[in-house]
Image (tube, grey):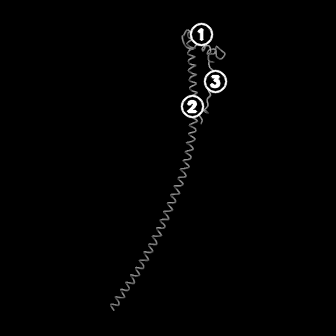
Amino acid sequence: MASSSGNSSGSAVQITNSGSEGDLQTLMDERKRKRMQSNRESARRSRMRKQQHLDEMMAQSAQLKAENGQIQGKINATTQHFVAIEAENSVLRAQMMELSHRLQSLNDILSYIDSCSINGVFDSLGDDCCFQQTGGGIPPHQANYLMNNGGSSSNPWMLMNQQPIMASADFLQY
């Protein structure tokens, strides 16, 4: 009886072991299935994150392209404005040079008139004497022209044609 009871006990252990192996195999299969499911879910989340990142990068790219276009437009407008201002500046410099030359000529004339008036040459001797007595200055024919220009010999300020200097930036456009 002892042997039969040992056999029964052994077979019970064997049955239990086979049950344990079956349970163990089922448990391992279940874990494997859960791991595969978890991996699939993780891969799905990873693909979603990757797609979301790609979408964000595409949106950022579109935004940067739009900003770049706006900046490029501002640069073009500023460049055109700069060219226009540069042309106007060139015209103003030309006018300044012309006015400086006119001012220098007027100062030379005033200096001549003052030197002749101080010596009393215009009052007593006439136009030609100032040139002859001072040994220089404005030649007599120019002095006559300057003093008599404008139809009035009493108005030396009517020395030049008083037309404004007009310049245009049209010649600088290309």
Q: Compared to 51, does 147 lie above or below?
A: above
Q: Indicate which disc, 3 or 2, sits on the residue closer to the N terminus.
A: 2
Between the residue at mark 3 and the residue at mark 1, the CA separation in whole angstroms equals 29 Å
Mark number displayed over residue 128: 1
Q: Pointer 2: what residue?
A: 90
Q: Compared to 109, does 91 lie above or below?
A: below
Residue 132 appears in which quarter of the rendering? top right
Between the residue at mark 3 and the residue at mark 2, the CA separation in whole angstroms equals 20 Å
Q: Residue at x 38, y 84 (%)?
A: 14
Where disc 2 sits, the SS reads: helix
Mark number displayed over residue 163: 3
Q: Are marks 3 and 1 in contact (CB under 8 Å)?
A: no
Position of 165 compared to 5: left or right?
Answer: right
Q: Indicate which disc, 1 or 2, sits on the residue closer to the N terminus.
A: 2
Q: Residue at x 51, y 57 (%)?
A: 54
Q: Residue furthest right?
A: 151
Q: Residue at x 57, y 36 (%)?
A: 83
Q: Inspect the image, locate mark 1, and give the three-letter code of the amino acid beneath it.
A: Asp
Residue 144 appears in which quarter of the rendering? top right
Q: Indicate which disc, 3 or 1, sits on the residue closer to the N terminus.
A: 1
Q: Inspect the image, locate mark 3, and give the three-letter code of the amino acid beneath it.
A: Gln
